[in-house]
Image: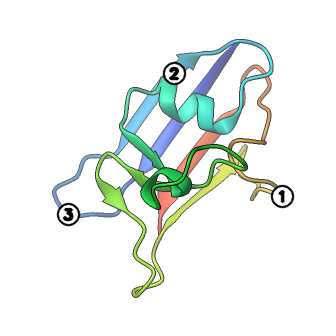
Amino acid sequence: MYTLVSIRFGTPGKADVERRVSLADGASVLDALRAAGVAVVSTEEAKGESCCGAGMVHAIDGVASDETRRRGWMYAVNGRPPSVGPGEAVLRDGDVVEWVYR
């Protein structure tokens, strides 16, 4: 199956990314992000804990969440906000995943 992954950094000097990725059936939003070829750090990894769980994202390509400024990574699938973490959200063929740093 194929999914379009769009990443909007909202950071001066950092180019946005848009990639069509091939995934196995049952792949998650987090799987799609990693397949897009960007560096991903989960919240668990950032805290030095073993991964997994909901797979919340702390950083993408070096742009990290900033709790003091209340900025972080949010995602949507086909324009809809999530009801689960990206490690739990299962994709279907043709889905569009958008990551935005806010």
Say the numbered circle drawn on residue 20. Answer: 2
Mark 2 belongs to which amino acid? Arg
In this picture, is 46 found above or below 70? Answer: above
Q: Is residue 15 left or right of residue 9?
A: left
**Helix, strand, or loop for circle 1?**
loop
Q: Badge 3 local density, few (<14 within 10 Å), some, or many (20+)?
A: few
**Residue at horizontal 53%, vertical 57%?**
43
Q: Badge 1 local density, few (<14 within 10 Å), some, or many (20+)?
A: few
The residues bearing labels 3 and 1 have C-alpha atoms spaced at a distance of: 30 Å
Q: Position of residue 101 (x, y in %)?
A: 45, 63
**Residue at horizontal 78%, vertical 42%?**
88
- Taking depth in this image into account, of 56 and 98 the one nearest to the observer is 56
The residues bearing labels 1 and 2 have C-alpha atoms spaced at a distance of: 24 Å
Q: Is residue 93 left or right of residue 2?
A: right
In this picture, is 65 found above or below 19? Answer: below
In this picture, is 64 found above or below 30? Answer: below
Q: Position of residue 83 (x, y in %)?
A: 83, 58
Mark 1 belongs to which amino acid? Ser
**Helix, strand, or loop for circle 2?**
strand
In this picture, is 93 found above or below 61? Answer: above
Mark 3 belongs to which amino acid? Pro
Q: Nearer the viewer, mark 3 or mark 1?
A: 1
First reached walking from the N terminus: tag 1 or tag 2? 2
Q: Which residue is mark 3?
A: 12
* Quarter of the rendering occupied by the N terminus: top right
Q: Residue furthest bottom?
A: 68
Q: Position of residue 100 (x, y in %)?
A: 50, 58
First reached walking from the N terminus: tag 2 or tag 3? 3
Q: Which residue is mark 1?
A: 83
**Residue at horizontal 63%, vertical 24%?**
3
Q: Position of residue 99 (x, y in %)?
A: 53, 51
